[in-house]
């Protein structure tokens, strides 16, 4: 049996070094979690997504701390996007 060895040169993702790379992705709102209307964009077909500002970042991200200002009411997709997952690491690699 082979035990996978973690790459020691790759820093572990944590709340202190996350940099919210996933918060530049388009996030569809597919369930009601209480996202405030001021953070919702509606497309021409009535589909709802998280509003992204001119800088490309989600409108709910605090630009100083890179923390979500509506964490308790974040969309389902944000709840499912696991910090440090393969998807997370892929987005970080593209952003960095």
Image: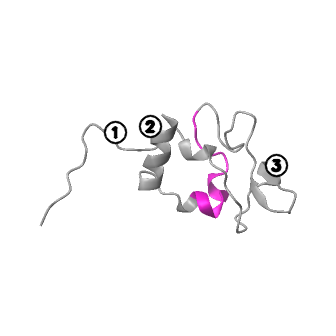
SS at circle 2: loop
Question: What residue is pinned by disc 3?
Answer: 38
**Residue 3: percent from the left, percent from the top?**
16, 60
On screen, residue 96 above or below 90: above
15 or 13: nearer the viewer = 13
Q: Label 2 neighbourhood size at 10 Å, few (<14), some (14-19), many (20+)?
A: few
SS at circle 3: helix
Between marks 3 and 1, how big is the CA–CA gap? 35 Å
Residue 50 visible here: yes
**Residue 42: percent from the left, percent from the top?**
83, 56
Give whichever of discs 3 and 1 has the lower sequence position.
1
Q: Label 3 neighbourhood size at 10 Å, few (<14), some (14-19), many (20+)?
A: few
CB atoms of marks 1 and 2 within 8 Å: yes
Q: Is residue 45 magenta?
A: no
What colouring method underlies this structural image?
one colour
Residue 18 visible here: no
Q: Choose top left, top right, bottom left or bottom right for residue 54.
A: top right
Q: Label 1 neighbourhood size at 10 Å, few (<14), some (14-19), many (20+)?
A: few
**Residue 82: percent from the left, percent from the top?**
47, 57
Question: What residue is pinned by disc 2?
Answer: 17
Between marks 1 and 2, how big is the CA–CA gap? 9 Å
Give whichever of discs 3 and 2 has the lower sequence position.
2
SS at circle 1: loop
x 80%, y 52%: residue = 41
x 25%, y 44%: residue = 7
Region of the chain picked out in magenta, as a range = 65-78
Question: What residue is pinned by disc 1?
Answer: 11
């Amino acid at each position: 049996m082979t035990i996978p060895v973690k790459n020691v040169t790759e820093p572990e993702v944590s709340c202190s070094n996350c940099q919210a790379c996933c918060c530049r992705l388009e996030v569809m709102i597919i369930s009601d979690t209480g996202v405030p209307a001021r953070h919702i964009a509606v497309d021409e077909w009535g589909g709802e997504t998280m509003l992204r500002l001119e800088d490309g970042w989600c409108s709910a991200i605090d630009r100083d701390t890179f923390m979500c200002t509506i964490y308790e009411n974040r969309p389902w997709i944000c709840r499912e996007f696991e910090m440090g997952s393969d998807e997370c690491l892929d987005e970080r690699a593209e952003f960095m």
